[in-house]
Amino acid sequence: MAHKLKITQFNTIQKVRKLTYKNNGRIIHNQNRPLPPVDNLRHPNRRLRRTSYYIKSKGVNLSNTEFDSVLTARGCPYNCKFCTFNINPLGQKRNYSARTPESVVEEIKSLDAGVIFFSDDNFFTNFKRSQRLCDLIIEQGINKKFIAQARLEIFKSPAMLRKAEKAGFKIMLIGVESPHDRILKQLDKGFTSKDIREAFKVLRNYAFYYHCYFIYGNIGESEEEMLYIPLFAKEIGADSISFMRLQVRKFSPLKEIIEKTPGYYLSPGGFVYSDRYSIDDLHRIKKDIKRAFYTPYQLYKIIRKLCRIKFITLVDIFVFIPRFPALLYRLIAREIEKKRRKRKKSDNKK
Ligand SMILES: C[S@@+](CC[C@H](N)C(=O)[O-])C[C@H]1O[C@@H](n2cnc3c(N)ncnc32)[C@H](O)[C@@H]1O
Ligand code: SF4
């Protein structure tokens, strides 16, 4: 097979969108074809699945209520520097494209699940559309619990938040990222620590459970600054947090920045580390953040909040109690295995 294309062939092939080909030893990706409007896509027929899904931890079902996920929009209109969720596998930005509230409600109604996770990167992007969706859920008497990823800016629409409460939204997953203005600016997050404090002053008035995402190990971030994350999270009223080490994924603009910053490096998995904080140091700091936030009192507060907002009921608690030993056993086994692997790694280094 000839690898060098004739000029006429090349001119035609160049125009075919989404085509990848080899010419003269070089791999060429043509421009992507625009994606069809999301409303033209049929939603999956979940009845063809062999199994039902439940919220699990370490393989243990935490409740008997079925769980499912629904995608109501593609892409995200924001441009946070670390985030590649809205970039397609060819490195092109996925334009934000949302389904009509009517089509989303039709899909929700077809589901058996009592808990639904909206897997959009940013569910409440268009406040007007979100309100319409809540109105439809309320009008049609749909009785389900919803979990959604949302940006902090939701606090600006009290009317939407009231409707979301009434429609059954229970858990909001919000990217706070950092308590420090310098880092929020570096990440191009689009808000300051003052904005975060003000937003949560409003958000605390609603019956939602707030899970906040934080990123640690940012460029120039000191250990003291990283350890401020749990204190700040408690101050703003986060119910739970996750803290991810800064990761540079494919097509991330952060790659060039890290490469140009003296003393900063990328691990094979794309995680950032530095001369100042090695991977082991960052691992130790992560444990300290976890220990400082997840105190026994905080765990008690989490359960109390989930009960108060009626995400879990007495029935869920009675279902969970006999499963607790299995969960505890798996958690302990995981910790023992982690320690064993760490010991093996350090023995191999010697
Ligand atoms: C879908 S977003 C959160 C919800 C919402 N879109 C927002 O920005 O508030 C998911 C979270 O994953 C984390 N994340 C995404 N890309 C990351 C990266 N490259 N390194 C570390 N954490 C990252 C961030 O904490 C981000 O807030
Ligand atoms: S972090 Fe959230 S808001 Fe920022 S680009 Fe990613 S999905 Fe969008």
Image: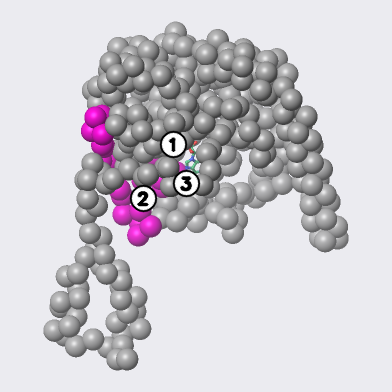
Q: Which residue is mark 1?
A: 69
- Marks 3 and 2: which is nearer the front? 3
Question: Percent position (x, y) of residue 37?
Answer: 21, 45
- The image quarter containing residue 242 is top right
**Between marks 1 and 2 in the image, the one whose residue lies nearer the viewer:** 1
Q: CA distance from mark 1 to mark 2?
A: 21 Å
Considering every residue shown, the one lying at the far bottom of the view is: 1
The disc at residue 87 is: 2
Q: Sequence order check: which comes first, mark 1 or mark 3?
A: 3
Task: Tell whether 305 sits left or right of 120.
Answer: right
Question: Looking at the image, is 137 positioned above or below residue 67?
Answer: above
Residue 229, visible in the rendered structure: no
The reply to whether the magenta stretch includes residue 95 is yes
> Which secondary structure, mark 3?
loop
Quadrant holding the C terminus: bottom right
Task: Name the colour scheme.
Answer: one colour
